[in-house]
Image: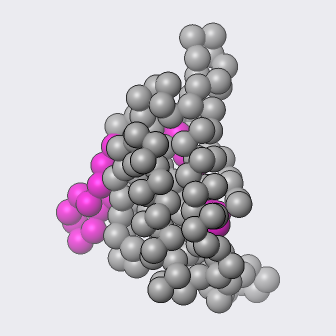
Amino acid sequence: MRAVVTRVKDARVEIEGQVNGAIGHGLLVLLGVGPEDGQAAADKMADKVCGLRIFEDAGGKMNLDLAAVGGALLVVSQFTLYADTSSRRPGFSHAAKPDLAAPLYERFMEQCRERGFRVEHGEFGADMQVFSQNDGPVTILLEV
């Protein structure tokens, strides 16, 4: 499982011109699922994302996690994180098929909710437009 995690001041995802999910201060998570991933990977990724200390404390150091700042998550499925870029035209055969990826995407979000976070999201497999006001910018790549 792979994630691109961006600290944001606000973010939203639109589908066919309608807002599907939106947050204020928090994390935009682009989440990709690989063919070997399972529930343990989703759980571990939720731990990593929710515990990531990338928010500034009073001294200006990145020392606080999402809970400490009262932030939310906007999670968007992103199979392109598993792109094979060995040629100029990316291939996506390394990404999990939807029958595996969709339930793990849902499990990741449920694990984040169980940790007490508000989770907004896109729609798995939809054509989406993602808007964000990056904070910092701070963007972290995670893999489990």
Dividing the picture into quadrants, the one containing residue 19 is bottom left
At 56% from the left and 31% from the top, the residue drawn is 65
Classify the position of the N terminus by image quarter. Answer: bottom right
Classify the position of the C terminus by image quarter. Answer: bottom right
Q: Is residue 39 magenta?
A: no
At 73% from the left and 79% from the top, the residue drawn is 85
Residue furthest toward the right?
86
Please tell me which residue lies in front, 35 or 128. Answer: 35
Q: Is residue 50 visible?
A: yes
Dividing the picture into quadrants, the one containing residue 81 is bottom right
Is the stretch drawn in magenta largely helix, strand or loop?
strand
Residue furthest toward the top?
59
At 76% from the left and 86% from the top, the residue drawn is 87
Relative placement, left or right, of 143 versus 50 is right
Residue 37 in percent (x, y) is at 64, 73
**Which segment did they paint magenta?**
1-23
Q: Is residue 11 visible?
A: no
Q: On screen, 25 above or below 37?
A: above
Q: How is the image coloured?
A: one colour
Q: On screen, 110 above or below 82?
A: above
Please tell me which residue lies in front, 71 or 134. Answer: 71
Q: Is residue 2 magenta?
A: yes
Please tell me which residue lies in front, 49 or 55. Answer: 49
Dividing the picture into quadrants, the one containing residue 16 is bottom left
Relative placement, left or right, of 1 versus 85 is left
Residue 86 in percent (x, y) is at 79, 83
At 36% from the left and 58% from the top, the residue drawn is 121
Please tell me which residue lies in front, 68 or 107. Answer: 107
Residue 75 in percent (x, y) is at 44, 57
